[in-house]
Amino acid sequence: MSIKISFQNVTKTYFFAGQNSFNALQSLNLDIEDGEFITVVGPSGCGKSTAMNIAAGLTTPSSGQVLVDNVPVKGPGPERGVIFQQYALFPWLTVRENVEFGLKIARHPKMERRRIADRFIGLVGLTDFADALPKTLSGGMKQRCAIARAYAVNPKILLMDEPFGALDALTRVQLQDQLLATWEAERRTVMFITHDVDEAVYLASRVVVMAARPGRLHKIVPVDLPYPRTEEMRLSPEFSNLRNEVWRSVYHPATA
Amino acid sequence: MSATMTEENSKASTRPSLLSRPMGVLAINVAAVVAGIALWAAVTTQGVVGLPTPLAVAHQAVIQAQNGLLWSDAAASLGRVFSGFALGIAVAIPVGFLMGWYRTARGIIEPYVQFFRTIPPLAIIPLAIVTMGIDETPKIFVIFLASFLSSVIATYQGVVNVDKTLINAARVLGANDFAIFRRVIVPASLPYIMVGVRIGLGSSWATVVAAELIAAQSGLGFRMQQAQLYYDLPTIFVSLIAIGVLGLIMDRIVITLDNTMTAWQEKL
């Protein structure tokens, strides 16, 4: 398999007034394979969101670089879809108009826009709400709409920043299953940021554990469970062992 | 404890209070207005204060409506407000966007806006009359200034307060600066702009009336100023009530417009 995203010595330092500086991310080296689903988990301040924002092109690294298909990231682009924790739907647009947004920017003809949008709205199960405004949707529905919007521009990569962080536990589990189903139907390279260990293990083929102060890669835990993931797997001893391993490395990392 | 609460809840749902129904509030509004007029009538018919009775004012209103003075005055005032206000908004919105979008533009324009905002538009009238003559131009200019200054800040605030996540969301979907401006900044700042429009219209209306008191040959303010010379209290009252009613109608129109244009907003 080929490398899709490659973090090469990526460091992000924030400087404050005076002599203070803060290493949000220190020398991150990480390769993500094409079509892989990796989750990044770690405590606050471990630089997981910073890493994702650099890959998205929304933040510039202080040193090092991120390569996507061997090309350095210079800024945001539609080939890297981003899903935000706060949904970031345009509140003045309906679900369908939101999903069509990127297609409109790319000047797709109207009929084609509509066809593509309706397909992904169907994929995330929002067909009945295609003409609804975001304010009428629940949190889970908003995030499904955001996922459809990201998919609609046909990105090669999906970068997800704690997308289910604001949802209740049950909705969260349902959306995890739906996301995996969508991912298996429309295979993309996914980098999924979370602080939920269960979620990290359930979704990923590899869990990247990060540590804070300074933000850095701590450990990579491969998840040798086949897709599709099921509820039985979630309750299996193998899952529980993996979860324990990830949990321990998240909450008791070796000191830097 | 919980039993009493449930009981109260069910009572509230089966028998809503007068205030919980929109028509109930309207009924109270109407009653309050009627009571106010009755009080006015009671006080003035007793001759307690030297003010005209509601009946005298109504009589004067009918006379003015019949001879057309009321309509021509209202039209003159409204005409000034709309030309000055339309001009003010038309300039304020692009300037506000400019200030919000470009730091340099903000640096150049903001000191002027902040300075002139502290001067009541009416204080400009003497200067405007001296430099622009006594026809319509100085009045329209002052109204332009009043509506411009209140709308430009609102528009600028709207642009500055656009949720950065929405801008990032547009950017990662491939939007360039122009597309972000057109498809995110403009719609997202619309609620702020509408607040500016509402405040601008209010201050325009206040300014036109005052400007007419100082220098005009027509309009509701001019009529009051004339009536003052002849101690014609009913006419003053007719003009005042007309000013209030027209101001209220304009405000309601803007609110309705705002509610339809920004229906997508999540209101509390």
Image (cartoon, coloured by chain):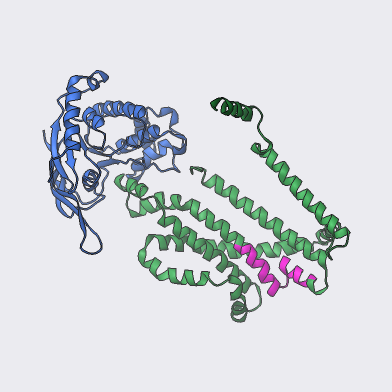
Chain colours: A blue, B green
Label tally? 0
On the picture, is B117 further left or further right than B136?
left
Pick the residue in front: A177 or B184: A177
On the picture, is A35 further left or further right than B22?
left
Q: Residue at x 73, y 73 (%)?
A: B217
When asked about the image quadrant of residue B63, the answer is bottom right
Residue A68 visible: no
Pick the residue in front: B268 or B172: B268
Q: Residue B140 at what x, y percent from top left?
A: 61, 69
Q: What are the residue bounds of the magenta stretch? A: B203-227
Q: Main secondary structure of the magenta part?
A: helix
Q: Give yes or no for residue B210 being in the magenta stretch.
A: yes
Pick the residue in front: B71 or A159: A159
On the picture, is B241 further left or further right than A134?
right
Q: Residue at x 21, y 60 (%)?
A: A20
Q: Residue B18 at what x, y percent from top left?
A: 69, 36
Residue B123 visible: yes
Q: Residue A98 at what x, y percent from top left?
A: 39, 40
When asked about the image quadrant of residue A105, the answer is top left
Pick the residue in front: B249 or A50: A50
